[in-house]
Amino acid sequence: MALKLQLVEDGKVIFQIPLSPTDWSREELVNDLNAFEANVQRYLKLFSALSNETRLRMMKRLLERKKHTVTFTDFMQDLDLNPKLVWENTRKLREGGLLVKIGRNGYRCSEFGETSFMMMSLAFRRLINALEDMDDF
């Protein structure tokens, strides 16, 4: 079975990738693996930023807000965190490019952060569920 993941914008496929290495030509696979290797540090920052329950909860909280903006105090109160944890985790999210500091005490999702979080949490969850529901997975 040839499963493909597609990214579609306004009904037009702008990106498509097979989900099985056997569906790639050898050259394509080698080229993409080499491109991956060249960007490992970038990916590590992103994966590191999202590989923590507190940071995932912080991103969720930001996306729940109308303007995707939260203050330092909001994080402390809403998520029952001490100031040190808020500081450490907002720093990690900023390093990953997911969070932007605004003003003296506020944070908002970067555009990259919104999209990355949606893709790596909500879309990933649905993709895994769909794959698990398939008979031959």
Image: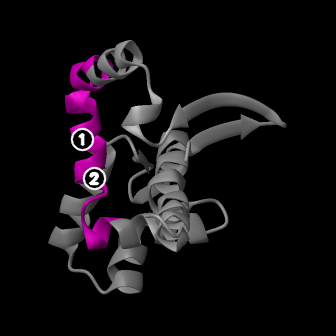
Residue 128 has which mark? none
Question: As displayed, is residue 73 above or below residue 97?
Answer: below
Q: Amino acid at mark 1?
A: Lys
How does the figure colour the protein chain or chains? one colour
Q: Amino acid at mark 2?
A: Ala
Residue ID at (47%, 43%) = 19
| Residue topped by disc 2 | 49
Residue 130 is situated, as x and y percent measured from the top left of the image, at 55, 66
SS under mark 1:
helix
Viewed as shown, does residue 29 lie left or right of 88?
right
| Residue topped by disc 1 | 45
Residue ID at (55%, 47%) = 1
Judged by its main secondary structure, the magenta piece is helix
Question: As displayed, is residue 129 above or below residue 82?
Answer: above
The answer to whether the residues at label 2 and label 1 have Cβ atoms under 8 Å apart is yes
Magenta residues span 34-55
Question: Is residue 60 or residue 68 the one in the foreground?
Answer: 60
